[in-house]
Image: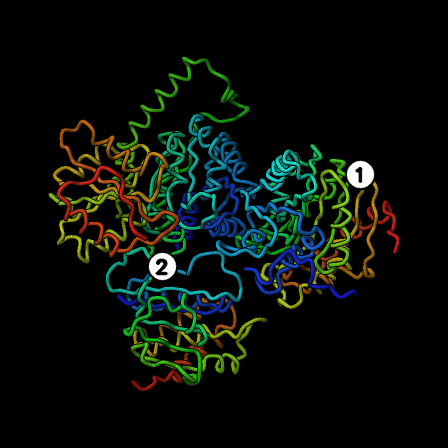
């Protein structure tokens, strides 16, 4: 079973990202379970969405304590203890940034990936009044970094679930897939 | 405009609200005008959640989260108890949203008003059940998109005339106010504070999340609501005498509607009907009302 | 058709497939998306119903009672505080023998405000005369709603279909949506024998003498006693058409097991995962309770036969009494001569996470004891 945590700020579409990923994995014949973090969130507050995938039926019903993958829409969420709860040295992360920041501690994680999802969103003019829409780019980056799901399934899921600018969002996912880079061990 | 000084603040900076939240501005000014000797009862809704989750609170004065629909009756009980303990001068504020006032709270509101219990009831009106994710209430204006009045069937009922209902109870003081006019709001709270009995304030509190406009435009949207006379500002004394507050010049209602995506499904005919309704209501109030002295 | 859905979407779909004619609902977290989805379906006439956007839950149930009296099929959904506001009217609907179906998304009761799941809201309705069924998965929710209508309209008692807040309502998982044609075969239109019809006027609900009331309650109990068989029939019919079975009590690995864990709702899923992982080797079995009212005494006794002990995990608490399922299990086993001891454990109140590790620690503790405790144990957070 793979356990994934996707975190951003309320309004950035972390939940939609988890649904897109869930749909793509499900299409590939995996059993999936996805859910948002709970509570009365408000726009701008840190928010997480969770996802389990397994060849067998998933009957477990509790939070994800030790995620195998953590996807962050904003790198400063690395410093948020609630968002990073349960991360271990076997956790891999994907960060929305073009390069590691000063003082980034590589040893905390197993594999580390970077992608400039904000840049991609900017170029494709994917934004709301408050945020750049990086969720679809991050989904694409995850697919190619983890190798868990192919881009065709991702594209189909994006086209099906995204409410507006479907083509641009599909393109964002594809570009992020190409641009995502792993840091050295 | 006088600069608002950061003294006599009864709230801490920060809350759990969305950026641009109208109701947080409202409670700041209401509590500022009421002062330290105040206790607050609030019912389920954004007003309860934004004030804070345990162990945090944004409010400096005593604050109680009561069950849904019971703001007025809880406040009545609190008032009675405080009076019995010699604290008649402590202000009791019931603070509820449109759902908790117009709908599920209407019975207890009517009860407290009919008894003329010495309570100030302030309804912050964001025109839907926002805390549970934007469902219609009887305060939702016609033509509005909400999750229970979706695209194919937007809200089709007129906004419930809560002021008319409260006026029928003959209570000493009623006023409408808007977070975009904080001085007017504070002035009305001070007037309400000086009177005894059941006092009702209806405060329009624009909500960027549910009304769908950019978060930085809350004050502007409120001003449009008042200028268009969708939400005129006035007072009613003893349930009968209407006094109009000073307001910007009247503008067409389309200017207000087109600034919010919750009205995006309106066509020309709908807008015309809304303008007619606004005109009708405004002419009723303005002909019966006297302008306040500057 | 296999698709991904949340528990709430499954509830709305189950309701839709049951062809309700009157829906009265009021929003409350975490039920809200059910009310929204139904509004959506009704607006697009994918459900042909009158949707009354009531101003409170009390009115929601009152409207359901009125709707049911007209002979129409009625549906509502709520949670915790909202269900509490319906309490008087649940007694009413049951006493009036009206087949209202209500989906309750379980959430802990205030004060203080809490959005997490526990079962005090529905279990507090224990004595109203309503039937109560608990679901573990979104598939079960979708299936149970039409099954509940079939049962309710036969037994003439309101039915609460219970589903865990957030852990089921907001989890997206695979669901198979049946064909509407098959569903119409399984659940035809409601045919109310008694209704408010000027062509055949009756007076309903008037005051009665003590003797009449006594007789009516006795009759209600008799009809409750018939429910287990009614459910078996309904379940058999459902399984024949849709290939899925939802018995009142479900067992896993209980044949001669050491400790049988008895629980309801999504916790059964976590137990299932634990069994698959470690539990089976440790001699642990699962008894999943679907029905709470009527309490499935015979099925439970059968399920626990041969087990060394039963461990009831209650995601609820009757303060001053203990776990509510535990009390009912103990009462059901009393006098059977099998002497299966019952351990009572409280866990998960307020939505506190219960994980396989918690279960493992619990079983390791219990299996290590010489004597099983009578007093109630509380799971560590």
The colour scheme is rainbow
Identify the image quadrant of the N terminus of chain B.
Answer: bottom right
**Residue C242 at x, y = what percent?**
29, 47
Q: Is residue B107 visible?
A: no
Disc number placed over residue B238 in the picture, else none: 1
Q: Quadrant of residue B230?
A: bottom right
Q: Quadrant of residue C221?
A: top left
Q: Chain of mark 2?
A: C
**Residue C330 at x, y = what percent?**
24, 33
Q: As rendered, which of C197 and B198 lies closer to the eye? A: B198
For the residues labelled 2 and 1, the Cα–Cα distance comes to 60 Å
* Helix, strand or loop under label 2: strand
Disc number placed over residue C3 in the picture, else none: 2
Figure check: B115 above or below C290: above
State the count of labels. Answer: 2
Figure check: C368 above or below A143: above
Looking at the image, which residue is at 83% across and 45% down? B242
Q: As rendered, which of A118 and C181 lies closer to the eye? A: A118
Looking at the image, which residue is at 68% across and 41% down? B119
């Amino acid at each position: 079973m793979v356990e994934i945590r996707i975190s951003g700020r309320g309004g950035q579409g972390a939940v939609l990202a988890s649904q897109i990923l869930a749909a793509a994995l499900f299409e590939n014949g995996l059993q999936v379970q996805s859910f948002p973090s709970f509570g009365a969130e408000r726009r701008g507050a840190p928010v997480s969405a969770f996802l389990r995938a397994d060849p067998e039926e998933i009957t477990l019903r509790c939070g994800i304590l030790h995620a195998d993958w953590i996807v962050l829409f904003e790198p400063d969420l690395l410093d948020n203890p609630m968002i990073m709860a349960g991360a271990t040295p076997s956790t891999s992360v994907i960060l929305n940034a073009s390069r590691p920041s000063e003082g980034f501690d590589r040893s905390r994680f197993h594999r580390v990936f970077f992608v400039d999802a904000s840049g991609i969103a900017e170029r494709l003019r994917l934004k709301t009044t408050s945020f750049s829409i990086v969720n679809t780019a991050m989904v694409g980056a995850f697919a190619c970094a983890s190798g868990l799901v192919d881009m065709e399934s991702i594209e189909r899921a994006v086209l099906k679930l995204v409410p507006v600018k479907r083509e641009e969002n599909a393109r964002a996912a594809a570009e992020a897939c190409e641009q995502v880079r792993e840091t050295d061990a | 405009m006088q600069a608002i000084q950061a003294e006599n603040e009864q709230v801490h900076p920060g809350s759990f609200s969305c950026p641009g939240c109208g109701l947080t501005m409202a409670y700041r000014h209401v509590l500022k005008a009421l002062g330290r000797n105040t206790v607050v009862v609030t019912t389920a809704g954004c007003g309860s959640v934004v004030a804070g989750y345990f162990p945090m609170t944004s409010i400096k004065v005593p604050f109680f989260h009561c069950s849904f629909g019971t703001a007025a009756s809880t406040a009545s009980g609190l008032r009675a108890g405080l009076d019995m303990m010699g604290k008649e001068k402590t202000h009791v504020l019931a603070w509820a949203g449109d759902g908790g006032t117009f709908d599920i709270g209407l019975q207890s509101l009517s009860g407290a008003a009919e008894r003329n219990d010495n309570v100030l009831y302030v309804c912050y009106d964001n025109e839907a059940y926002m805390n549970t994710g934007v469902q219609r209430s009887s305060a939702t204006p016609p033509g509005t998109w909400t999750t229970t009045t979706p695209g194919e069937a937007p809200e089709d009922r007129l906004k419930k005339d809560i002021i008319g209902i409260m006026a029928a109870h003959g209570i000493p003081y009623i006023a409408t106010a808007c977070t975009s006019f904080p001085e007017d709001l504070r002035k009305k709270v001070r007037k309400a504070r000086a009177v005894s009995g059941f006092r009702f304030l209806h405060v329009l509190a624009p909500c960027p999340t549910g009304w769908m406009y950019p978060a930085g435009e809350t004050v502007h949207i409120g001003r449009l609501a008042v200028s268009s006379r969708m939400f005129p500002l006035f007072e009613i004394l003893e349930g009968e005498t209407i006094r109009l507050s000073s307001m910007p010049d009247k503008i067409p209602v389309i200017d207000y509607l087109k600034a919010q995506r919750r009205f995006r499904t309106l066509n020309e005919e709908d807008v015309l009907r809304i303008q007619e309704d606004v005109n009708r209501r405004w002419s009723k109030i303005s002909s019966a009302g006297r302008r306040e002295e500057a | 058709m296999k698709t991904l859905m949340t528990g709430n979407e499954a509830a709305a779909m189950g309701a839709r497939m049951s062809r309700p004619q009157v829906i009265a609902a009021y929003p409350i977290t975490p039920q809200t998306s059910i009310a929204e989805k139904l509004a959506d379906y009704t607006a697009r006439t994918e459900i042909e119903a009158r949707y009354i956007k009531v101003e409170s839950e009390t009115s929601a149930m009152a409207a359901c009672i009125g709707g049911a009296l007209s002979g129409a099929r009625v549906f509502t959904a709520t949670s915790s505080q909202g269900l509490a506001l319906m309490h008087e009217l649940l007694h009413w609907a049951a006493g009036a023998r009206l087949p209202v179906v209500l989906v309750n998304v379980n959430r802990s009761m205030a004060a203080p405000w809490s959005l997490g799941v526990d079962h005090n809201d529905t279990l507090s309705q224990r004595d109203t005369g309503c039937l109560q069924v608990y679901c573990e998965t979104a598939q079960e929710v979708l299936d149970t709603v039409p099954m509940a209508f079939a049962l309710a309209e036969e037994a003439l008692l309101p039915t609460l279909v219970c589903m865990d807040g957030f852990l089921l309502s907001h989890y997206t998982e695979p669901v198979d949506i049946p064909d509407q044609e098959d569903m119409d075969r399984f659940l035809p239109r409601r045919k109310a024998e008694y209704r408010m019809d000027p062509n055949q006027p009756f007076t309903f609900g008037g005051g009665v003498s003590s003797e009449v009331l006594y007789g009516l309650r006795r009759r209600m109990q008799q009809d409750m006693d018939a429910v287990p068989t009614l459910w078996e029939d309904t379940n058999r019919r459902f399984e024949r058409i849709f290939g899925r079975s939802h018995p009142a009590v479900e067992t896993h690995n209980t044949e001669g097991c050491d400790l049988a864990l008895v629980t309801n709702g999504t916790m059964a899923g976590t137990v299932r995962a634990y069994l698959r992982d470690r539990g089976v080797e440790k001699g642990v079995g699962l008894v999943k309770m679907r029905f709470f009212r009527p309490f499935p005494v015979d099925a439970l006794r059968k399920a626990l036969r041969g087990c060394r002990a039963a461990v009831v995990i209650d995601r609820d608490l009757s303060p001053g009494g203990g776990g509510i399922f535990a009390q009912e299990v103990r009462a059901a086993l009393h006098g059977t001569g099998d002497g299966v001891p019952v351990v009572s454990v409280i866990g998960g109140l307020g939505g506190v996470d219960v994980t396989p590790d918690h279960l493992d620690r619990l079983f390791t503790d219990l299996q290590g004891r010489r004597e099983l405790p009578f007093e109630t144990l509380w799971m560590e957070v």
